Image (cartoon, helix red, strand yellow):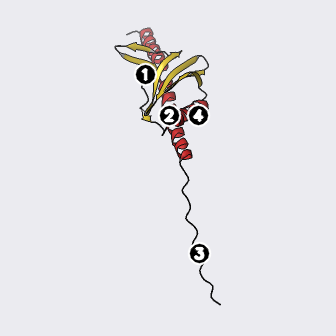
Amino acid sequence: MSLRSLALCLALAAALSGCKIVPLVEAPRMRAGDTPELTRSAIIRALIGFEYMVDEESPGRIRARYEQNSWTMVVDITYGQDVAIQYADSVGLGHKVEHDVSYIHRGYNERVQELAKEIQRQIMIASLETRPMPTASPAPPPPPTTR
C-alpha cells in the first residue's frame, strides 16, 4: 500500500468516526404521575427547563422541538399510564434508516436520555407537591413542676 493510499484511508476513518452516527435509542418508558394533568405539567416544566418549544399538543401527546445552531430535533411525548419519548423528526443530525435500523447523531440519544430523567424528576416533584402534608402530633405536655 502506498503512503498516499494509507493517508487517504486514515483520513477517511477519521472523518467517519467524527460523524458520531449511532443507532437511535428510544428512552425507556417511565411511570406517569397520579393524574394526566400532573403528568402534563411535569413534562412541560421539563421541556421549558431544557429550552424545548412545544409545537403541538393534544390530550396525552406533546410534540416538542429543540434547536441549536444548525440542527433541530423533534420528539413526540405520549402520556397516560406511562410516559414515552419517541423520535419524530430532525434536521442536521444525520438520521437514516438502514436494514430497519434507525441511525442518528449520538447527541440525539444523549439529549433524549437527559430529557427523560428530567421528566421523571419533575413527575416526582409534582407528586410530592400534591400529597397532603402529614399532620404533626400534638406536643407532649411539659413535665410537672415540683415545688
From the image, tell me which residue sits under label 4.
45
Establish if 147 lies above or below 53: below
From the image, tell me which residue sits under label 3.
141
Q: Residues within 10 Å of mark 4 (few under 14, many from 20)?
A: some
Q: Which is more foreground, mark 3 or mark 1?
A: 3
Q: Residues within 10 Å of mark 3 (few under 14, many from 20)?
A: few
For the point 54% across and 39% down, which residue is it? 122
Q: Earlier in the sequence, mark 2 or mark 4?
A: 2
Q: Earlier in the sequence, mark 2 or mark 1?
A: 1
For the point 51% across and 35% down, which residue is it? 39
For the point 40% across and 18% down, which residue is it? 102
Q: Earlier in the sequence, mark 3 or mark 4?
A: 4
Q: Which is more foreground, mark 3 or mark 4?
A: 3
Q: What distance separates the C-alpha of mark 1 from that of mark 4?
A: 29 Å
Which amino acid lies under the numbered mark 4 shown in the image of this protein? Answer: Arg
From the image, tell me which residue sits under label 1.
22
Which amino acid lies under the numbered mark 2 shown in the image of this protein? Answer: Pro
